[in-house]
Image: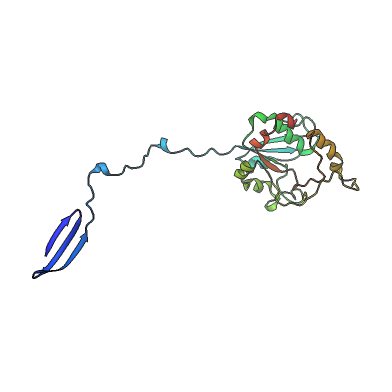
């Protein structure tokens, strides 16, 4: 038997008499170096190399209320939200509208005008009532609860889309709630009677649409970028 090792390959030749019976080749793994200089370095542990956690989005709730209404539920149940609660019938309140007119729209616009230069990332405009039926019938959450509605709101979706209605159910409102040229006109639909003049005032060069539909009911969330897409003067 003759054994030869060359370049990590061992060959064994067995012979019988004058003849070679067979040759076996054995592959040997190369020896691993023991030099510590070849050991891969450990990952750095310096905290300066760890990227910082993303900063949470800032967010605020804007509400219009009457002086008699209790909105303490906002701060008690939504402590991670700032809030701006406007009392519409008391000009001595810390936050108030100049006149009690226009329902919640007046408070919403007052906030946008006054806070235009210091808006948080997300603004939720909601009603002063917390929950229950019939007062909160239009709040699209368990028990008609605005706390649940905001706790389950997908903030990142609002940030991406710019606007989201807090009511997912389309009715009432869609597909054709407002028809400015309804024929024959219906006396109780006062918003339709006022719609053409209001549209021309706000959108001077835009044709008045014959049909407008959107889920009700004045509760929605917007991103700062969406608000800033228009100048402050458009909200005045």
Across and down, in percent, residue 76 comes to 64, 42
Q: Identify whether 179 is placed above or below 204.
A: below
Residue drawn at x 66%, y 47% is: 149
Instruction: Return the residue nearer the eye: 5 or 51.
Output: 5
| Quadrant of the image containing the N terminus | bottom left
Q: In which quarter of the image is residue 8?
A: bottom left
Decide if residue 35 is on the left or right side of residue 219: left
Across and down, in percent, residue 40 comes to 31, 44
Q: Which residue lies furthest to the front in this view?
A: 18
Instruction: Return the residue nearer the eye: 198 or 69.
Output: 198
Residue drawn at x 84%, y 42% is: 191
**What colour scheme has been applied to the protein in the rendered image?**
rainbow
Instruction: Return the residue nearer the eye: 170 or 10.
Output: 10
| Quadrant of the image containing the C terminus | top right
Q: Quadrant of residue 44?
A: top left
Across and down, in percent, residue 204 comes to 80, 33
Residue drawn at x 76%, y 37% is: 105
Across and down, in percent, residue 109 comes to 73, 34
Residue drawn at x 67%, y 53% is: 142
Q: Quadrant of residue 24?
A: bottom left
Q: Is residue 94 visible?
A: no
Decide if residue 5 is on the left or right side of residue 39: left
Q: How many labels does the image show?
A: 0
Decide if residue 206 is on the left or right side of residue 20: right
Instruction: Return the residue nearer the eye: 90 or 211.
Output: 211
Q: Is residue 27 visible?
A: yes
């Amino acid at each position: 038997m003759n054994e030869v090792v060359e370049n990590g390959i061992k060959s064994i030749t067995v012979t019988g008499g004058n003849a070679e019976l067979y040759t076996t080749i054995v592959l040997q793994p190369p020896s691993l170096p023991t030099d510590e200089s070849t050991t891969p370095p450990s990952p750095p542990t310096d905290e300066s190399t760890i990227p910082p956690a993303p900063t949470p989005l800032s967010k605020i709730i804007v509400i219009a209320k009457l002086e008699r209404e209790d909105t303490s539920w906002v701060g008690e149940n939504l402590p991670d939200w700032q809030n701006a609660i406007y009392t519409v019938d008391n000009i001595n309140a810390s936050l108030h509208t100049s006149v009690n007119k226009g329902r919640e729209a007046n408070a919403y616009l007052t906030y946008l005008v006054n806070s235009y230069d210091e808006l948080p990332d997300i603004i939720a405009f909601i009603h002063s009532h917390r929950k229950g039926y019939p007062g909160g019938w239009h709040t699209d959450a368990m028990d008609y609860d605005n706390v649940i509605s905001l706790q389950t709101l997908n903030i990142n979706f609002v940030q991406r889309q710019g606007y989201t209605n807090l009511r997912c159910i389309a009715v009432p409102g869609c597909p054709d709630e407002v028809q400015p040229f309804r024929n024959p006109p219906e006396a109780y639909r006062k918003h339709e009677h006022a719609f053409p003049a209001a549209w021309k005032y706000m959108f001077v060069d835009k044709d008045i649409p014959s049909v407008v539909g959107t889920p009700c009911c004045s509760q929605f969330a917007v991103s700062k970028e969406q608000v800033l897409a228009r100048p402050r003067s458009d909200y005045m």
